[in-house]
Image: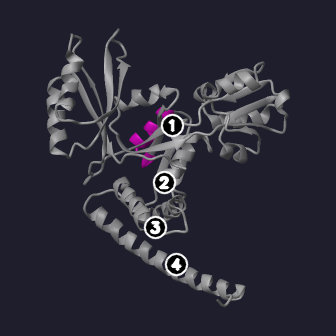
Amino acid sequence: MKNTSLRELRRRVQDMDRKLTSLLNERARIAVEIGMVKTAEGGTVYDPHQERRVYEQIGTINEGPLPESSLRHIFREIISASRSLQQPLTIAYLGPEASFSHLAAQSHFGGSVSFSAQPSINDVFDRVERGQAHYGVVPVENSLEGRVNLTLDRLLTTPLKIRAEIILPIRHCLMAAGILRDRILRVYSHPQALAQCQIWLRKHLPDCSLHAVESTAFAAQTARKDPEGAAIGSREAAAMYELKVIDEGIEDHSSNATRFLVIGDEGAGYIGGEKTSIVFGTRHEPGALHRALESFAKRCINLVRIESYPLKGSLWEYLFFVDFTGSEDDERIGQCLTELRERTTFYRHLGSYPQGAARQ
C-alpha cells in the first residue's frame, strides 16, 4: 500500500474542514428557521427534549473512531451556538464562577449563552422569576449528603417549573496558593463539600480548622488571600483563581454526584418528559400516605424518589416530594394524578422533563 504524504493528508483535512464549515452554517440557517417557527407558534427556543433526541441519535449513528462522549461535547457547542442565533439566553446559577453549579450549567447549555453568577439559591430563583434570566441552575440533592433544603423551599412556592435535570459527578481537589500540605492551618469550602471529604480530612489534615463558606468557588477565592489556608473545590476553580492543586480526588466516595435542576417558565407548546416531579401533603391520620401512594401502585407507575419534608409552621407535619417515571401527558398518569389530588390536602406539579444522565 502506497504511503500517503503528510502534505496530502493535511490537504484532505483542509478540504474536509471547508465542507464541515459549510455544513455547520447550513445547519445554523435551518436552526434560525426553526426558531422563527417556534416563535410563530408561541414556543420557546430552549427545548431540552429535542436536544436529548439529538444526543441519542448521535449515539445511534456514531461509527467511531471518535467516542460518543467527544461527539456529545462537540454537538453541545453546535446546539448552543445554534440556539443563540434563535435567541441569546441568560442562565443564572449559584456562583461564583467555577462553582459546581457553574460547571453543571456549562455542561448543559454550552458556551454560547450568557452566564449570570448569583450569591444564593434564592437569588437564582428571583432572577428567573423577574425575567432577568431565562433559566436558572440550582442544586437539589447530592448522592452522599442528600437534599438541598433551600431549593426545595423555593420549589413549593415558585411559579417556575423544572425544565431539565443535570447529573454532575463531583471530583474534589485540595488547592492552595503555593503552600505545602503540612503547612495548611485552615480549609475552606461549602458545608456539603467539607462533609463529602470528611474521612480524607481527618486522615490527612486532622489539626486543621474547617471553615464553611457559601460555595466552593468562594472558598478558592478565600484561600487565595490566606497564606496558611486551602480550599476544597473543582480543578476548574483552581485554574480560575490561580491556585495549585495539592491533592485530587479527595472525596470519600468515588460515586459522589450532585443533581441539579434547570428551572424556568414552561412556555406555550410545552411537552412532557420521561420523568415528573410533584409535591403533596396528606391529612394527619392513619393510612393517609398509603392511600395517596396507592394511586401509583395500582397503575404500576415507578417511583424513583420519595422524600418527606417538614411543613414549616406545623409541628410534626410533612409534605412529600416524589419523582416518578413518565409524564402528565400520559393518560394513565393523568388519571393517577387526578385521583391523587382527591386524596391529598396539598398538591403541586413541579415539572415533567427529560431524565438526566451523568455528565463527564
Give the image location of residue 255, x and y in percent. Answer: 55, 36
Would residue 36 appear left or right of 235 to someone viewing this image?
A: left
Q: CA distance from mark 2 to mark 4?
A: 22 Å
Give the image location of residue 338, x and y in percent. Answer: 15, 33
Q: Outermost residue, front direction?
A: 1
Q: Which residue is mark 3?
A: 62
Q: Outermost residue, bottom direction?
A: 2
Q: Which residue is mark 4?
A: 20
Q: Amino acid at mark 1?
A: Thr
Query: Image point 25% across, 62% down: which residue?
Result: 41
- Report the front residue among 211 and 131: 211
Mark 1: secondary structure: strand
- Membership of 122 in magenta stretch: yes
Q: Which residues are magenta?
A: 121-135
Q: Amino acid at mark 3?
A: Asn
Q: Amino acid at mark 4?
A: Leu
Mark positioned earlier in the residue sequence (3 or 4): 4
In the picture, the disc for residue 258 is: 1
Mark 2: secondary structure: helix
Can residue 182 be seen in the rendering of this structure? yes
The answer to which image quadrant residue 174 occupies is: top right
Mark 3: secondary structure: loop
Looking at the image, residue 310 lies above or below residue 28: above
Query: How many residues crowd around disc 4 within 10 Å: few (fewer than 14), some, or many (20 or more)?
Result: few
Would residue 300 appear left or right of 139 to someone viewing this image?
A: left
Looking at the image, residue 340 lies above or below residue 16: above
Q: Which residue is mark 2?
A: 109
Q: CA distance from mark 3 to mark 4?
A: 16 Å
Query: How many residues crowd around disc 1 within 10 Å: few (fewer than 14), some, or many (20 or more)?
Result: many
- Report the front residue among 35 and 110: 110
Would residue 171 appear left or right of 135 to someone viewing this image?
A: right
Mark positioned earlier in the residue sequence (2 or 1): 2
